[in-house]
Image (tube, helix red, strand yellow):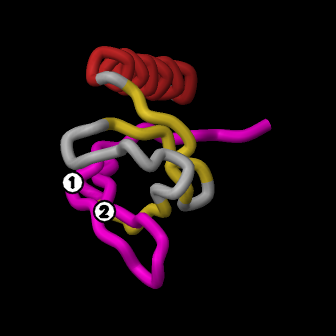
């Protein structure tokens, strides 16, 4: 099973011939390879798995995923209390 995390592309650049970008996950920013999503641009949301953006999402889809993550976290908190 794989887990991909949505993040927002904030910068796109090339490094050694490879399309790369800075992607923001909440308050955390990470460098991500954008080779599998060559159309990704700043402002887009992408699903990232092990440092590679594997698909582009629209903003509505990304917000739905964030909402689901918050709900899971809330349920986990209720269970552990």
* Disc 2 to disc 1: CB gap under 8 Å: yes
Count all numbered tags in the image, as a single digit.
2
Q: Main secondary structure of the magenta part?
A: strand
* Placement of the N terminus among the 4 image quadrants: top right
Q: Nearer the viewer, residue 18 or 5?
A: 18
x, y percent for residue 70: 38, 24
Is residue 74 among the parts visible in the rendering? Answer: no
Residue 20 is a magenta residue = yes
Estimate the spatial distance between the alpha carbons at disc 2 and disc 1, rounded to whole Å. Answer: 6 Å
Q: Residue at x 43, y 34 (%)?
A: 56
4 w.r.t. 61: above or below: below
Residue drawn at (41%, 39%) of the image: 46
Decide which of 52, 63 is in the foreground and name it. Answer: 52
Q: Which residue lies at the image location 32% right of the left edge and 55% below the top edge?
A: 23
Residue 9, magenta (yes or no): yes
Query: Which region of the structure is painted magenta?
Result: 1-28
Residue annotated with mark 1: 10
Residue 68 picture quarter: top left
Q: Which residue is mark 2?
A: 22
Badge 2: how crowded within 10 Å, few (<14), some, or many (20+)? some
Q: Is residue 43 above or below residue 29?
A: above
Q: Is residue 43 left or right of residue 15?
A: left
Locate residue 58: give its quadrant: top left
């Amino acid at each position: 099973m794989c887990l991909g995390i949505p993040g927002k592309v904030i910068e796109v650049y090339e490094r050694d011939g490879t399309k790369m970008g800075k992607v923001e996950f909440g308050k955390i920013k990470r460098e991500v390879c954008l080779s599998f999503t060559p159309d990704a641009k700043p402002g887009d949301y992408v699903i990232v798995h092990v440092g590679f953006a594997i698909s582009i999402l629209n903003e509505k889809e990304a917000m739905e995923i964030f909402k689901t993550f918050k709900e899971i976290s809330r349920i986990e908190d209720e269970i552990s209390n």
